[in-house]
Image: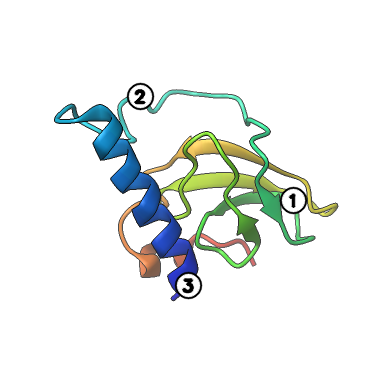
Amino acid sequence: MDVAKLKRDYDIRTLRVRELGARDVSPFESLSKRACVSNGCKCKKVKQGQYCGMCDAVTAAGGQGALYGTDIYECSPSGACCWYGPSSTCAGSVENDKKYCPK
């Protein structure tokens, strides 16, 4: 389990709750088709594909509220990365998230 990734997600969620107050802070409000955003995330040099944030391939979640524990990223052989946002495939548990790390 990557404790540093989990701690970062916890800190970001705590900040969101403070900023939004009692409003629902669910990251799954709109799960529609979306572009892959360059948000400063980073990946290891891996096979092209979509990786959950808890996969070892994703080394930095980037900004714009990206979370390791719920979000999905596109990684490339050059190490380039972009962020799709929340994914029900990646949400849940670390064990579930790790199942969706391309081999």
Residue that label 1 marks: 48
Give me the residue at 64% from left, 60% from top: 59
- The answer to whether 78 is drawn above or below residue 19 in the figure is below
Viewer can see residue 26:
no
Amino acid type assigned to the residue bearing label 2 in the image: Ser
Residue that label 2 marks: 30
Residue that label 3 marks: 2
Q: Nearer the viewer, mark 3 or mark 2?
A: 3
Query: Could you tell me which secondary element the residue under label 2 belongs to?
Result: loop
First along the sequence among labels 3 and 2: 3
What percent of the width, then of the height, locates residue 19?
29, 31
Query: Could you tell me which secondary element the residue under label 3 belongs to?
Result: loop
Farthest right residue in view: 78
Q: Is residue 94 left or right of residue 14?
A: right
First along the sequence among labels 1 and 3: 3
Point out the image quarter for the C terminus. bottom right
Please tell me how crowded label 3 is: few (under 14), some (14-19), or many (20+) other residues with Cα within 10 Å.
few
Give me the residue at 33% from left, 42% from top: 15
Amino acid type assigned to the residue bearing label 1 in the image: Gln
Give me the residue at 50% from left, 62% from top: 54
Do callouts 1 and 3 mark residues in contact (Cβ within 8 Å)? Answer: no
* Corner quadrant of residue 43: bottom right
Q: Is residue 41 left or right of residue 70?
A: right
First along the sequence among labels 1 and 2: 2
Please tell me how crowded label 2 is: few (under 14), some (14-19), or many (20+) other residues with Cα within 10 Å.
few
Query: Could you tell me which secondary element the residue under label 1 belongs to?
Result: loop
Farthest left residue in view: 22
Q: CA distance from mark 3 to mark 2?
A: 27 Å
